[in-house]
Every structure is written in C-alpha cells, then in structure tokens.
Amino acid sequence: MRRGEISRESVLKTLAEHDELGRDAFLAKYGFGEARSYVLVHEGQEYDSKAVAGVAHKWEQGRALAPGEFSGGRDHAAAWLKRAGFHVKAIQNPDWARDEIILACQLVMENGWKGLEAQDGRVEELSALLQLLPIHAEAERNEKFRNPNGVARKTFDIATRHPEYQGKPTNGGALDVAVLREFLARPEEMTETARLIRQGIATGELQPLAPTEDEEFDDYSAPEGRLLMRRHRARERNKGLRKKKIASVLRRGGRLACEACGFDFEKVYGERGAGYIECHHVLPLHVAGEGRTKLSDLALICANCHRMIHRQAPWPTPGELKASIQEKHAADVRAAAAIARPRWAADEQMPNP
Ligand SMILES: [Zn+2]
Ligand SMILES: [Zn+2]
C-alpha cells in the first residue's frame, strides 16, 4: 500500500461518511482521536485531518490506515490533503520566538512598562510586522496569527512580569521572563537589537536567510533572537570571506590554529584537515548591524570551540574562552599534582593499620 496516494474524490467520499456517521462515531469506527495540530476546512466545516487522511485510503487501497502508521503533521496527513487540493489549517499558532518577544518587550518598555490595548496604533503596527517575520512557516499559522488581540495580550503578559508590577502576572512563559530580564539588564543593547530586527525586515536583508540548525535552541543561546543569529551564521559561513581570512593569515606566516585552544586540523588529520578552520564573527550581534564584515571581525576557531561559544549566552570571545580553557587546565594540573605528591617519610614509617 502506498501511503499518501489519496485523490480528492476519495477524500470527499470520506467527508460524506463522516457527516453521515457524526464526528464521534466516525472517529471511533476507525480508531482515531481528535486532531491536535491541523484541521481540514471544507465548505465552512472543520474535520480532524489525520482521521480523514487515514480513512481516505480505503477507497483506493482497500483499507484505511491505522493511526500508528503515519503522522498527522506536515510530513504526512496535512501534506497529503493539501496535495489533494484541500485547505488545511493549523489549530494552534506557534509559540512566540525570542525575536517576536523582543519586539513586543521593546514596545512595552517604551510604554513605561505598561501593557497596550489591541486598538492602539502601535499594536496594530507590530502585529503587521510580526506577520512579515520569516520565522514561522505559513502552514503553521492560522488566521489569528499574531493579530492585534494576541499582540496586546502578549504586552500584558510581559508588563505583568515586571518586578515592580503589583499583582498577579496574566500569563506568559519562561522566554517572556528571560527577554524581560535582558531588557532590564541591558536596555540600550536590547533596544538596538529590536531596531536591527526591524531594519533588517524593512530592507529585506533578513527574509532570505536560511534558518540555522537547532533554531529553538537559539531562543536560549542567542539573546538577540533567531534572525540576527541567522545573519551571524551566514556571515561566518560566507565562503569568500573565509577564504580571504585564511589567505591573510597564511600570508602573514600564521598557522591555521584555533585562537581559543590551538587545535590545528592539519596537524591532527593530516592532508584531510589541511586548509580547514571555521570562522567566528566576533562582534556582538547588536553591534554587527550595518556595513560589511571586516576580516578583523573574524576569528579562526575550531569546530568544538565554535560550538562551545554559541552554546549559551553570553558568548565568550575567543580570548575569554582561551583563558577559561587555561584556567581549567591549571586547576586539573594542580589536582593531579596533589594526588601524585610523594607521601612524607613519616607516613612511610607508619605501621599499616
Ligand atoms: Zn578550539
Ligand atoms: Zn560564530
């Protein structure tokens, strides 16, 4: 049986059966639960997308798919139904990404740490901007995605988390609190970050950048958000720039060694590692706004150290990482020396207990 090969006609027959049986009986008959992520919308009615996609198989392939044989999401049910020409929509909008919270938090700060109403022009403007951000795919959004009501609610979630707010917080999650703390600790930098995100969208610079792997991870490791992080990655992966940086180091007689730990790919891997090193863009994201990347903005860094720098905010500079490696090493040497220290002569003469 070929999964996913369902025609528009068999889906329509399935919808007819659904309407005849009623939702509960239909789901029970085929062993499906209620849809959690996507619904199929047809003639103003909503259907459980996974159940419909599974059952539609029986008209063409002899039997319905069981729930365990496929997923309800973008890889399976939702994709198949779309391919058959149906409208599928996300039930829940995606969680707010750090970039979105940064923009909302900046507005709340500007408003004296008070929430804003949905009718406020600034909320309407932010709502329109959030819909332009290239973070959440179209298929993951429903018609209420970041609408003024949702944005206004978010501003209250943030405002009621402010340490001076008297009363209960309305809602909101750990990421709201994390971003709020960043704003309280470094207001100028975070305001500049919000400005750079807005500017990058206005100029169209940020839209085409590919997402980095582990994007959700970036909500915690990059205080400046996913979009500026994408730009950081794009700059350091720029092949031309890396080539130029490597050539300039070699021209000055330098070695292609990690500036933090000294790792040299050629030394360890021989020919395979020759000429290889990664580049890390050393300017903080909120500073590295406009302008071209200079070679002096790039540091040579091995893959391990690069990971460690990006792992958690605040990012150490290569020099700071180097110092921490040396410190750790010195502590290890002291500990090893303490264990290996020869025992005192007096100890040697003690009778064994
Ligand atoms: Zn290294
Ligand atoms: Zn980097």
Image (cartoon, helix red, strand yellow):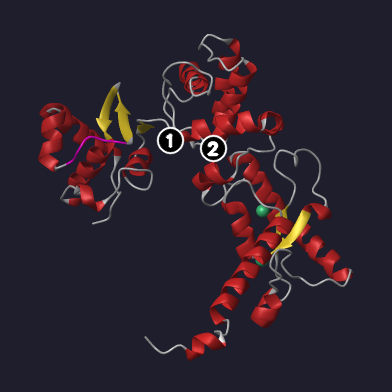
Viewer-side residue, 72 vs 214: 214
Density class for disc 2 (Cα within 10 Å; few <14, some 14-19, many ≥20) is some
Q: Residue furthest right?
A: 252
In the picture, the disc for residue 140 is 1
Residue 156 part of the magenta segment: no
Viewer-side residue, 179 vs 131: 179
Q: Position of residue 320 (x, y in %)?
A: 70, 56
Task: Characterize the magenta stretch by its predominant secondary structure.
Answer: loop
Give the residues in magenta. Answer: 32-36
Asked if residue 10 shows in the view, the reply is: no
Density class for disc 1 (Cα within 10 Å; few <14, some 14-19, many ≥20) is some
Q: Is mark 2 within 8 Å of ligand 2?
A: no
The kind of residue on which mark 2 rests is: Ile
| Spatial CA span between label 2 and label 1 | 10 Å
Q: Residue at x 41, y 30 (%)?
A: 93
CB under 8 Å between callouts 2 and 1? Answer: no
Q: Residue at x 87, y 73 (%)?
A: 253
Viewer-side residue, 348 vs 35: 348
